[in-house]
Image: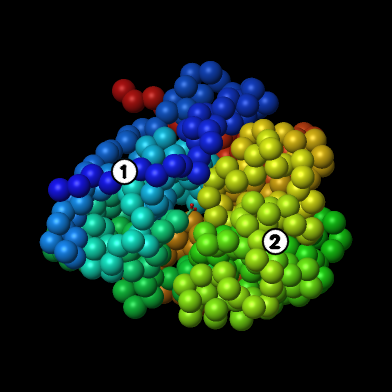
Amino acid sequence: MSTLAAPVSHLRENPFEVAREQLAQVADVFNLDANLVNVLGQCKKAVEVSVPTRRDNGSVSVFHGFRVTHNIARGPSKGGIRYHPDVTLDEVKALAMWMTWKCALMGIPFGGAKGGIVCNPKELSRDELERMTRRYTSEIINEIGPERDIPAPDVGTDANVMAWIFDTYSMNKGHSVLGVVTGKPITIGGSLGREEATARGALYCLREALRQQQRGFDGLTVAVQGFGNVGSYLARFLTQNGASVVAVSDSSGGLHNSSGIDIAAATAHKQETGALQGFRGADSITNEELLLVDCEVLAPCALEQVVTGENADKMKARIICEGANGPLTPAADEILEERGVLILPDILANAGGVVVSYFEWVQGLQEYFWKEDEVNAKLNDIVTRAFTQTWELSEHRSISMRMAAYGLAVQRVAEATTTRGLYP
Ligand code: GLU
């Protein structure tokens, strides 16, 4: 048996410390009770499991997995499962806390959770991924459930992985349990519009921000970092709406063309070759260079902590739309705030995914499925309402959009906690 060694991490700071520090700042600005902040600053439950997995060559690799619930004051906990070589318990805890705030800001009845397995899914065959996923699911089977904790896709996982989780859970219960996981394939109870939902939510959020500046997408220049579920759909939607996507990237590197990249052609190239690199319609750049290209909007849609104290003052973008969770370090945030850059924070800009996950859960519980137009219209309502509430609070209190979003969210969770009272 082999235990896989962790590679050098993309994380520069401990994300859970960052998340706790954010909470402390919110508590300060909104004058929150110190006892409550102590409660909200910790995760309710963190489970660590080992996931022995038979490899195709007959050997066994033991992967490390986590599932963390941050808070359930407003409903069952909700959040994705991440397959990535850099996953750590503290990263999962931070992501779980952010999910609590995200669901509260959107006004959907969930708390926050997150899960992860330390692995490189690109180096695993489909069969290996399936065996690892099923074993992980069985290790956390007592933690999850439609009324308890509901996983979903995140970095490195997709609808197939959700199908295996759904099936493993259902086989153990003896019947299909649609509500145990969201982001499922449509054929087994997924929701129309779920796959594109995170990008669509980011698009709606950016549209509202532009509306405040009396402008639209036409001619807007955008750089999109990350070409996974969020970045690829966002780049596509932006071009469909008349914006010019001047740079894109995936983990293999980036592409730049100041007159705009043909996103459909770049997507086809990626589908054919497995990477954006080598696409002829643009120049090659690195992921670091992408952050600094000349553009009006930067959408970091990959991992955390890509914009830092070192590169924040060199960025040209005037709006940042956080498609990823936690893409800015606190130092970067401060520099950009000072420079007057408008930051659309993660819990607002990338919440579309969990909003449509909520719709999928509701549809599954009712066994009654909606049309795609209905899903998108309801998503639009929720994201636009959250944007407006955040914008108004930010104006009213002269605080950043991040502080306003986190302030609204944390106060909602605090209120639910106080209303329920402390058990026993
Ligand atoms: N992983 C996504 C997020 O970070 C979606 C979570 C969900 O749908 O539950 O928001």
Q: Is residue 177 visible?
A: no
Residue 152, position as x, y percentages in the image: 39, 57
The reply, left or right, for residue 145 in relation to residue 206 is: left
Q: Earlier in the sequence, mark 1 or mark 2?
A: 1
Which label was assigned to residue 34? Answer: none
User: Left or right: where does residue 10 sit relative to residue 64?
Assistant: right
Nearer to me, 307 or 346: 307
Q: Secondary structure at mark 1?
A: loop
Q: Nearer the viewer, residue 18 or 384?
A: 18
Q: Which residue is mark 1?
A: 5
Please state which of residues 322 and 13 is positioned toward the viewer in this rendering.
Answer: 13
* Label 1 neighbour load within 10 Å: few <14, some 14-19, many 20+: few
Which image quadrant: the C terminus?
top left
Q: Point out residue 371 in the picture as x, y percentages from the top left corner.
A: 49, 78
Query: x, y percentage for residue 328?
Result: 63, 42
Q: Residue at x 27, y 39 (%)?
A: 48
Q: Which mark is residue 223?
A: 2
Q: Are marks 1 and 2 in contact (CB under 8 Å)?
A: no
In the displayed structure, does residue 353 sit left or right of residue 6?
Answer: right
Q: Residue at x 79, y 51 (%)?
A: 316
Name the kind of residue labelled 1 in the image: Ala
